[in-house]
């Protein structure tokens, strides 16, 4: 479906708060709450929605995506009991713009900026605002990055009843900070950082409270107190992001866990223990849902905000973190934007499935709305992938779009099997346009732009369309 036709026909009021459903699967059948009902609901309540977001985790870092050296039993089990996406994309190749697309349902061409300086405006519609209006308890626990505590973008001003974590994304690079935010209140921690700056950065001389562990405990407590009503838990962990500040230890962990005895570089043992800790705590969250009998009433999604990093002394090649893909964080090649993604919903999602549906972060808002039985805003770029989760006919994107301001300026468009990548955009000299056939060349090894000028022209037209503010 053409995007302009989709925007005319998507159901819902201008604010996106009216009851209803997003229109149109590929069969023309209506979606929305009825889709959930057809999946076999076990109670009359709206489904809980949990979105767990890793930070800089690569496509190849999980066992269920081919990882051989790191062990991720909890996430592998989640994939075995649910559905694993093979062609899901982050909204950008770095943190803040990627999270913007996740929260708003818009691609980066419709964002105020295309780099790390994102800040949500007061009237910005977010998935949290929509679900809160539908009666959901809402919580964001972890790294926000879309507006500091004293701005309009603060998470407690963007639809979250509960926030605990880092409001400013620079602050989130310090796992041993002396404070976190609980809504608008500063919470002091027991760590000692003698020269901490205003953004919470500094070298800790006493490390007593590891922020990731605090986030898991807070998430478990939120599930405990919200178990009797529908809830939306957004859990953007900071693991396995590096601390790049001079004087810190790069990949920071309390201990190296089961990897302490490995004959590996220190930072790689730290990275491995980060992934192990992440996997362990996802398992704890799933166990808590089961303890409360909420597993069949909860859609759990797991993903990463962009591709693997090469920071803090970590080398992504050590664990083959991007798998068969080219590129890492800050690239618009597949390794920088294609991310591991798992969906789990016992009784609704058939176990042991994979889907090659081409989807992206800005699809989450309409997906969450459809699961909750409410209408998304009309002017969103996303398409609900709930049908793909439930094994139903799924409407496809005409194209996906990315733009990135750093390193000379980059842009990419994917349409079906074709992927165009622009480098050094906007420069009079040096701009380069590449084309890859992902169906035949997943690793993007051979630029075929010269052989397919018609395809390049079509994807260029999509790029121009996408940049309309």
Image (cartoon, helix red, strand yellow):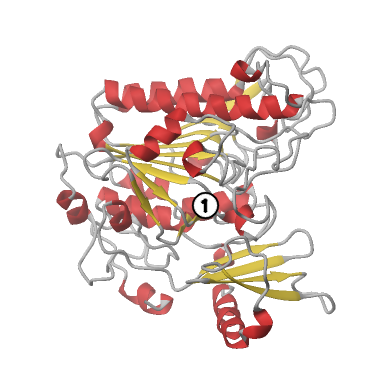
Nearer the observer, 199 or 91: 91
Write the residue at 32% across / 43% down: 352
- The answer to whether residue 48 of the structure is visible from this angle is yes
Nearer the observer, 468 or 64: 64
Quarter the N terminus occupies: bottom left
Question: Residue 327 appears at what percent x and percent y?
Answer: 68, 55
Quarter the C terminus occupies: bottom right
Write the residue at 69% across / 42% down: 316
Q: Quadrant of residue 151?
A: top right
Question: Residue 222 appears at what percent x and percent y?
Answer: 39, 25
Judged left or right of residue 343, residue 373 is: left
Judged left or right of residue 174, residue 468 is: left
Write the residue at 23% across / 26% down: 293
Q: In the rendered image of this protein, does residue 107 appear above or below residue 415?
A: above
Q: In the rendered image of this protein, does residue 19 appear above or below residue 192?
A: below
Secondary element at image label 1:
loop
Write the residue at 60% across / 48% down: 323
**Which residue position is annotated with label 1?**
122
Nearer the observer, 300 or 265: 265
Q: Quadrant of residue 177?
A: top right
């Amino acid at each position: 479906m053409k995007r302009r036709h989709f925007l005319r026909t998507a159901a819902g009021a201008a604010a996106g708060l009216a009851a209803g459903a997003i229109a149109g699967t590929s069969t023309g059948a209506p979606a929305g709450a009825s889709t959930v009902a057809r999946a076999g609901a076990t109670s009359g309540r709206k489904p809980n929605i949990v979105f767990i977001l890793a930070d800089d985790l690569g496509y190849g870092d999980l066992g269920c995506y081919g990882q051989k050296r790191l062990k991720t039993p909890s996430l592998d089990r989640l994939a075995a009991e649910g559905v694993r996406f093979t062609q899901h994309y982050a909204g950008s190749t770095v943190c803040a713009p990627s999270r913007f697309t996740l929260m708003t349902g818009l691609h980066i061409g419709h964002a105020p900026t295309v780099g790390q300086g994102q800040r949500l405006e007061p009237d910005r519609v977010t998935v949290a605002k929509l679900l809160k209006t539908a009666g959901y308890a809402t919580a964001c626990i972890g790294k926000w990055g879309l507006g500091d505590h004293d701005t309009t973008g603060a998470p407690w001003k963007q639809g979250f009843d509960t926030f605990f974590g880092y409001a400013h994304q620079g602050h989130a690079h310090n796992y041993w900070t002396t404070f976190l935010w609980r809504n608008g209140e500063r919470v002091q921690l027991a760590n000692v950082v003698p020269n901490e700056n205003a953004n919470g950065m500094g070298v800790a001389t006493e490390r007593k409270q590891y922020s990731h562990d605090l986030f898991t405990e807070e998430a478990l407590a939120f599930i405990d107190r919200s178990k009797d009503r529908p809830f939306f838990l957004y859990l953007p962990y900071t693991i396995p992001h590096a601390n790049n500040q001079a004087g810190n230890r790069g990949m920071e962990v309390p201990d190296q866990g089961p990897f302490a005895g490995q004959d590996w570089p220190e930072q790689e043992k730290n990275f491995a223990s980060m992934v192990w800790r992440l996997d362990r705590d996802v398992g704890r969250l799933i166990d808590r849902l089961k303890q409360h009998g909420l597993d069949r009433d909860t859609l759990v999604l797991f993903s990463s905000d962009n591709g693997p990093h090469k920071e803090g002394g970590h080398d992504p090649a050590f664990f083959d973190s991007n798998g068969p893909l080219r590129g890492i964080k800050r690239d618009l090649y597949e390794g920088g934007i294609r991310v591991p993604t798992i969906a789990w919903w016992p009784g609704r999602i058939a176990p042991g499935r994979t889907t090659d549906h081409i989807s992206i972060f800005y699809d989450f808002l309409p997906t969450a709305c459809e699961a909750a039985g409410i209408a998304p805003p009309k002017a969103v770029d996303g398409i609900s992938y709930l049908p793909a989760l439930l094994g139903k006919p799924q409407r496809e994107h005409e194209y996906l779009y990315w733009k990135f301001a750093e390193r000379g300026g980059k842009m990419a468009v994917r349409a079906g099997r074709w992927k165009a990548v622009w480098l050094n955009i906007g420069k009079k000299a040096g701009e380069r346009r590449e084309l890859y056939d992902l169906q035949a060349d997943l690793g993007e090894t051979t630029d075929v732009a010269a052989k397919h000028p018609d395809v390049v022209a079509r994807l260029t037209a999509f790029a121009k369309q996408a940049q309309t503010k």
